[in-house]
Image (tube, rainbow, N blue to C red):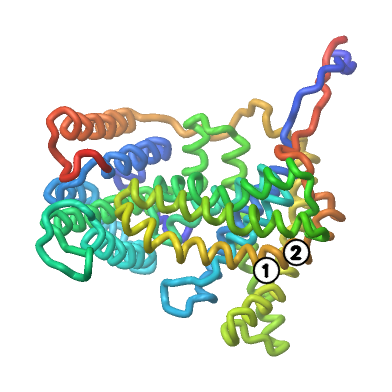
Amino acid sequence: MSELYCPGNTFFHKLSPQTKIIFTFLMSITALFIQMPLWNLVFLLAVGIPVIWLKFKLKVTSAVLKPFLRTAVVVTCAIAVSWLLFSGVGKPIYKVYDGIYITDLSIPLAIAMALRLLSLLAITIILVVTTREVDIIAGIRKLRIPYFICLIFALALRFIPTLYDDYHTIVEAQMSRGLELEKGSLLERVRKLIIILVPWLITSFKRVTILANALDSRGFIPLQPRSFYKEPRYSKTDYVMIFLSFAVFILVLILRYYFGYLAIIPWRL
Amino acid sequence: MSGKKKGIFTPEISTKAIVVAALNSGIYYVLGTFGTLFQPIPGVSVIYPASGYASATGIWFGFWGVLGPIIGTILSAPFWGYSIPVAIAFGVLAGMWDALIPAIVWRVMKLDPMLRDKRSIIMYIIFGSIVNTFMDAFGGMIVSIAIGWYTPEFAFTVAIWPWFIADAVACLTLGVLMLKLLTPYIERSGLYFEGFFALTLIEEEGEE
């Protein structure tokens, strides 16, 4: 995640991490209640314009956005196949195969779902591009998630680069002995992967005892109450942002369930 | 304070359990990226190695092994380009089952983690490779339907099978090999958790 963070001094950077987490969750849930292409487009513009602005303002590289674009393309294809051929609602307008029809509702539904996916990705991009991983962890702690869970997140993030380093060291050692990981049948590849995995996992498990002893020697007790040197605080802007996020969420719920807008198939998300 | 023991014991999470959960999350994250090694067609993986690992960690570490697939999935969301709330749903409703079912079955039925007897092998095939991965794929489909990626018709006729097969094959190949090859090390190094939560009892200090 740290590779995705882009330093800056924008409005989003100044928000506290817990506000951005609340915003991310509320907006993601809100996106799930919108199921009409026009409204999905409005929502996508609302969350997508900040992403485009951040891209130019922070000079976000395409490497940061690449996984999101890849997912957008792959999942949009799946959505297209799923909703165009298997929507099961509306009047048939084109027969594809026996029992498989494109209906009058399947095209708008496929567009709505694709736009929803893009909205979800845009919301996550705002969070990960403007928030350091340590701040995200501080944010979830501030949201009263038990400390030991936050510690697991923090330690796991600390472990990932070490695990990659160990893995590459072992792969290079095996390759220097003639191992070709990407060649051979499926079973052959599994056997080769095991040759890598066993020493890699044993090296990793050795770290558990070392780290656990280090924590114990400093008197660490997981469920004890703790105090922190640096506490994330809420500013006025944070309160306004949280209020607006809740307001949008409630407005969408009212529009959908009281006035019957925003949905092509009211009985499903 | 005299520092005399009160004789009151409170359950406490061991630091080893926390570090194990963190390491599992990291390993699950890294193994998730190995799926590309088993892609006959780009984008379609026939083995998902992280599932095989999750099944083994459920057996070794109980609850602390179950946290690996959940936290690993959440952490890998930006890597795969997923939305974080969606990744949480996938981790809790799908990935978790890979480790949770074998973790419970092994502790309730007191099975052998090294699969040395017939009963353990049969139970591993049923609960460590088929039922857990089916629940994983089923949970994944429920999340995919809820967020609008798939229709129920597409999810349960087409999409569920590649997911289930990739996970089940990983459990039947990598999972078995890991249990056979690594269990002796895990037991020797004191990392095998016999209880599901592996809580330790700490005696409170204070005036008697």
Under mark 1, the amino acid is Asp
Residue B39 coordinates in the image, percent (x, y): 48, 76
Query: Dot 1: what SS?
Result: helix
Name the quadrant of the N terminus of chain B. top right
Marks 2 and 1: same chain? yes
Q: Residue furthest top?
A: B208
Marks 2 & 1, CB-CB < 8 Å contact: yes
Name the foreground residue: A236 vs A193.
Answer: A193
Q: Residue at x 62, y 56 (%)?
A: B54
Under mark 2, the amino acid is Thr
Position above or below: A206 against A154:
below
Name the foreground residue: A45 vs A161.
Answer: A45
Position above or below: B116 against B206:
below
Query: Dot 2: what SS?
Result: helix
Name the foreground residue: A104 vs A73.
Answer: A104
Q: Residue A203 got which mark?
A: 2
Parent chain of label 1: A
Disc 1 marks which residue?
A166
Residue A163 seen in render: yes
Query: Is B27 situated left or right of A131 in this image?
Result: right
Q: Residue at x 77, y 55 (%)?
A: B119
Q: Residue furthest front?
A: A98
Query: Is B73 situated left or right of A250 in this image?
Result: right
Quarter of the image for residue A152 reads top right
Query: Is A133 situated left or right of B107 in this image?
Result: left
In three-dimensional space, the C-alpha distance between marks 2 and 1, rounded to whole angstroms, equals 8 Å
Q: Residue at x 47, y 38 (%)?
A: A139
Parent chain of label 2: A
Q: Residue at x 20, y 35 (%)?
A: A252
